[in-house]
């Protein structure tokens, strides 16, 4: 270790430069948009280059079991050691590259998207902070550092979701995201505390990741302890990665600018949770109970969000729910792998591919939103969304990848997860997974077909679907240059370029499965092709697309989802499974009604009462003592003299 | 007239004079404390102070006796007279004395008296082993300017400050009234 | 032995003076009367110093110097006290100490 170590230096620069950019922009250059942009771009390009060069240099040198750690012990207290530094192993190295790449692409994209926004510089500062915290999270060598970065990610997401803070719903959404994820983070932190607490007397240095991970873990902690810690940490994961039942913040997070959504949904915020599971995979794998809980929750998440995605009319909502469902899918893959004694590859692989195609989907959506000034894809469809060639092609590629169609990236990673689920003794899980894939394909292609094949202008379906809100969903920048963009059928190259790059990723990532597996695990398992499963998976995806074609695509389609036949269910989905209602009710009755009330009572009576009692007793005794203060100087003097004489006589006689 | 003759010896005359001085002091002090008229109090104080000056003569110190009369009688008592004239008019009816207060004060003073009396009585006073007999005023002056120079300076400072303070306090009301 | 050649004579005398002064301080209501009583107390102390000086001290100058200082301090004290009396009278229209009750609890 040492500052001249090139690995340490580049890691340090990767993390420090975005932070520097944040600070410089926020303090000095926030008035000057162009300058801020160049600072921020520089400070994200250099980490990009460094991350890839690290990857190139180290991809043969590190394995999961033998990471490169450069750290300093920040705090040493008896057996607890809190290190700060960088840890490079295949998992973090790959994630570092993904984050750096996507953050960079989104910064490029935002040049076009955020053009003319009054908060342009602030936006770039916040993006830098977001990138910095995620990069630091990924490369953290200790759990405390990871936790700090984790919270910084939460902070940055709050800043970005509520970026248009003058809009009430945006600031509310920012708050919601912050509070809800914080709710999970309590669990995360408690898990860390318990973990440290349990391991302390076993003389294991505490908060380094690998000390937690060690294979000896199971021997040193009891099953119950591991389960407790794993479940508590999963609370944090559920908050960040939007798992049921605290996924409610993620759809609302759409209030932020679309590049933010892209970043949030692909590489940073939500990925952090899944990344944490992969990071602590041995810990989770050590507890079958915890993993079963995770499996159940992630399956619920998958189904819940897919069904809501089926009825959403806001394109970003659809992608948001698809993110939730894909995150559920990843968690399913990881937990199934843990239960089946397999490796973390499948879930992590899906995280990688998902990062590419989900960023792609959101950025495409961003182009449409920027262009048409609405979030409603039916409106986009009527206004001629398919005339925008590049985003339309790329969004279709992204959708194919999301649906899991060969040869796009999603196909391979989903296949890997399905294989993990297949290995579980209970075939219910793989069935639910296939059902989820079916739904995913359905709602994805609902969007695509609606956009691709709009009805004629006089078609009666528009009565239901073409609702142009006054003022639109657009933001300030949009209103300013609306006319300039509307007649122009090109997409600015700064926005098109990231789309093309990401589309390319979505196409080729699938074929890198073997290479990635070898890189991640050190060896590649020979794939015995499970043709039945292959057929099932592709079949479910294709049937989903087919159903979408029947409902939305074909010229004869009535533009009514098959779900319309069961109005109760449809309403249930439109109301988002009443989750928001549930939480409202929960807050009102349980939190405000019960805890707050008890605590308020406690505050009023015990705390305030105690303070008041002290004050009153002070006043009272003062008032009592003030009777002595008669203002009769001579009386006081008399007592003084009497006491003096008394004491003197006593001493004199007593001698 | 042996009885009378014994008084006419130098010692006898000195003793008689001493008792007279003591009587002056105590009677003066009693007048100073007990008389209702404040002016009589001052006169009693003058009497007592002259008596104290006489005691100082008996204590071999004519210089201090002189200073006693000069400072106390000549300065402080006159200042008190000024204070009387500057404050409450004397023709106002005085409030009646309270018996409890007088009794309390008498008890306090009496207890202290008893205490100090017993203390004085019980103590054996031992003179210093070597005693100088130099009573001259010159020596006092010498001491004032050598051994006690610091206190001398401090006292002069104190007098200055007291003078200024008295002026400040006393004229504080004039501007406002 | 002559009565005025005894240390105790002077001590008892000073004690009487002191007790009378103390009584005055405790019993009188006029501020001026209290000041007069305080002067008595100071004189009692002076007598004590002079007596000790006469009968016990190694050098006779010491007590006299102290007595002189007491006189100076008494003068200062009298000046301050008188100005306070004047100020109090101006404020309360009275120099009765029982009327000065602004600090009553």
Image (cartoon, coloured by chain):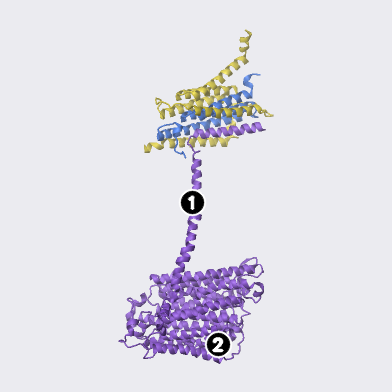
> Considering depth in this image, is A101 or A383 the residue closer to the camera?
A383
Q: Which labelled disc corresponds to residue A612?
A: 1
**Residue pictured at 57% horizontal, 88% vertical:** A514
The quadrant holding residue C48 is top right
> Considering depth in this image, is A55 or A388 the residue closer to the camera?
A388
Do residues under tags 1 and 2 come within 8 Å of each other at their CB atoms?
no
Which of the marked residues, 1 or 2, is nearer the chain's N terminus? Answer: 2
Q: Chain of mark 2?
A: A
Q: Quadrant of the N terminus of chain B?
A: top right
State the SS at label 2: helix
Position in image of residue A365 (x %, y %): 41, 82
> Considering depth in this image, is A508 or A568 the residue closer to the camera?
A568
Q: Quadrant of the C terminus of chain B?
A: top left
Q: Residue reaching furthest right?
A: B129
Chain identifier of the yellow chain: B
Q: Which labelled disc corresponds to residue A513?
A: 2
Q: Is residue A266 visible?
A: no
Count neighbours of disc 2 (C-alpha within 10 A) and say few if under 14, some if 14 to 19, many if 20 or more: some
Mark 1 vs mark 2: tell me if same chain. yes
Position in image of residue A515 (x %, y %): 57, 87
State the SS at label 1: helix
Chain identifier of the blue chain: C
Chain identifier of the purple chain: A
Q: How many marks?
A: 2
Q: Residue reaching furthest top?
A: B1
| Vertical side of C32 occupied by A163: above or below | below
Position in image of residue A87 (x %, y %): 59, 76
């Amino acid at each position: 270790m040492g500052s001249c170590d090139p690995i340490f230096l580049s890691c340090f620069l990767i993390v420090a430069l975005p932070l520097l950019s944040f600070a410089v922009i926020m303090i000095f250059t926030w008035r000057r948009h162009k300058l801020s942009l160049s600072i921020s771009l520089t400070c994200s390009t250099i980490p990009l280059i460094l991350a890839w060069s690290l990857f190139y240099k180290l991809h043969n040198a590190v394995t999961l079991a033998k990471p490169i750690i450069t750290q300093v012990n920040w705090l040493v207290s008896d057996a607890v050691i809190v290190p700060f530094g960088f840890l490079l192993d295949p998992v973090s190295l790959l994630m570092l590259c993904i984050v750096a790449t996507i953050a960079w692409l989104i910064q490029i994209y935002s040049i076009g998207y955020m053009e003319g926004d009054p908060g342009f510089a602030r936006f770039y500062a916040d993006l830098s902070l977001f990138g910095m915290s995620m990069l630091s999270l990924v490369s953290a060598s200790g759990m405390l550092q990871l936790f700090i970065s984790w919270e910084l990610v939460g902070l940055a997401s709050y800043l970005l979701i509520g970026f248009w803070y003058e809009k009430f719903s945006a600031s509310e959404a920012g708050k919601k995201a912050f509070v809800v994820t914080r709710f999970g983070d309590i669990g995360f932190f408690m898990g860390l505390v318990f973990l440290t607490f349990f391991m302390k007397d076993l003389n294991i240095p505490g908060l380094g990741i690998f000390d937690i991970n060690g294979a000896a873990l199971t021997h040193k902690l009891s099953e119950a302890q591991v389960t407790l810690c794993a479940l508590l940490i999963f609370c944090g994961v559920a908050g960040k990665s939007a798992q049921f039942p605290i996924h409610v913040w993620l759809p609302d997070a759409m209030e932020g600018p679309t590049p933010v959504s892209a970043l949030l949904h692909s590489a940073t915020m939500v990925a952090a949770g899944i990344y944490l599971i992969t990071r602590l995979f041995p810990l989770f794998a050590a507890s079958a109970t915890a993993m079963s809980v995770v499996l159940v929750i992630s399956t619920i998440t998958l189904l819940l969000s897919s069904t809501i995605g089926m009825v959403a009319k806001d394109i970003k909502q659809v992608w948001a729910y698809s993110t939730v469902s894909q995150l559920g899918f990843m968690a399913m893959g990881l937990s199934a792998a843990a239960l089946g004694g397999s490796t973390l590859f499948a879930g992590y692989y899906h995280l990688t591919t998902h990062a590419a195609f989900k960023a792609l989907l959101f950025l495409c959506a961003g182009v449409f939103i920027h262009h048409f000034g609405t979030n409603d894809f039916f409106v986009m469809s009527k206004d001629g969304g398919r005339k925008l060639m590049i985003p339309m092609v790329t969004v279709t590629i992204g959708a194919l990848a999301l649906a899991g169609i060969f040869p796009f990236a999603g196909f391979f990673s989903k296949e890997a997860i399905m294989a993990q689920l297949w290995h579980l003794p209970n075939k219910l899980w793989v069935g639910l997974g296939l059902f989820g894939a079916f739904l995913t394909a359905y709602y994805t292609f609902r969007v695509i077909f609606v956009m691709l094949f709009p009805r004629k202008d006089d078609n009666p379906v528009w009565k239901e679907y073409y609702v142009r809100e006054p003022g639109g969903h657009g933001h300030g920048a949009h209103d300013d240059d609306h006319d300039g963009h509307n007649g122009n059928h090109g997409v600015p190259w700064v926005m098109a370029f990231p789309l093309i790059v990401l589309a390319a990723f979505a196409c080729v990532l699938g074929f890198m499965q073997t290479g990635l597996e070898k890189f991640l695990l050190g060896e590649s398992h020979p794939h015995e092709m499970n043709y039945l499963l292959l057929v099932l998976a592709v079949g479910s995806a294709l049937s989903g697309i087919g159903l979408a074609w029947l409902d939305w695509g074909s010229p004869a389609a009535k533009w009514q989802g098959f779900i319309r036949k069961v109005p109760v269910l449809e309403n249930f989905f439109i109301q988002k499974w009443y989750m928001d209602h549930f939480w409202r009710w929960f807050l009102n009755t349980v939190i405000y009604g019960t805890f707050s009330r008890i605590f308020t009572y406690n505050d009023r009576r015990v705390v305030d009462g105690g303070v008041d009692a002290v004050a009153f007793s002070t006043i009272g005794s003062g008032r009592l003592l003030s009777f002595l203060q008669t203002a009769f100087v001579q009386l006081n003097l008399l007592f003084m003299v009497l006491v003096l004489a008394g004491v003197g006589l006593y001493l004199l006689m007593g001698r | 007239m042996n009885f009378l003759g014994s008084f006419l010896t130098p010692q006898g005359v000195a003793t008689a004079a001493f008792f007279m001085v003591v009587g002056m002091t105590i009677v003066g002090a009693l007048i100073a404390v007990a008389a209702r008229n404040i002016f009589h109090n001052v006169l009693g104080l003058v009497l007592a102070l002259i008596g104290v000056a006489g005691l100082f003569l008996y204590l071999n110190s004519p210089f201090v006796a002189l200073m006693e009369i000069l400072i106390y009688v000549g300065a402080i008592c006159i200042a008190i007279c000024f204070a009387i004239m500057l404050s409450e008019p004397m023709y106002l009816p005085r409030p009646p004395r309270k018996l409890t207060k007088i009794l309390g004060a008498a008890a306090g003073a009496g207890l202290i008296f008893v205490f100090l009396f017993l203390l004085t009585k019980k103590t054996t006073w031992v003179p210093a082993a070597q005693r100088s007999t130099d009573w001259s005023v010159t020596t006092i002056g010498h001491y004032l300017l050598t051994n006690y120079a610091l206190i001398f300076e401090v006292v002069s400072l104190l007098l200055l400050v007291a003078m200024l303070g008295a002026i400040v306090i006393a004229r504080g009301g004039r501007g406002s009234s | 032995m002559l009565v005025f050649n005894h240390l105790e004579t002077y001590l008892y005398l000073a004690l009487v003076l002191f007790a009378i002064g103390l009584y005055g301080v405790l019993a009188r209501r006029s501020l001026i009367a209290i000041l007069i009583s305080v002067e008595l107390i100071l004189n009692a102390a002076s007598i004590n110093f002079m007596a000790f000086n006469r009968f016990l001290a190694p050098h006779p100058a010491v007590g006299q110097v102290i007595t002189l200082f007491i006189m100076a301090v008494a003068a200062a004290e009298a000046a301050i006290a008188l100005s306070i009396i004047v100020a109090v009278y101006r404020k309360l229209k009275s120099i009765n100490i029982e009327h000065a009750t602004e600090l009553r609890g």
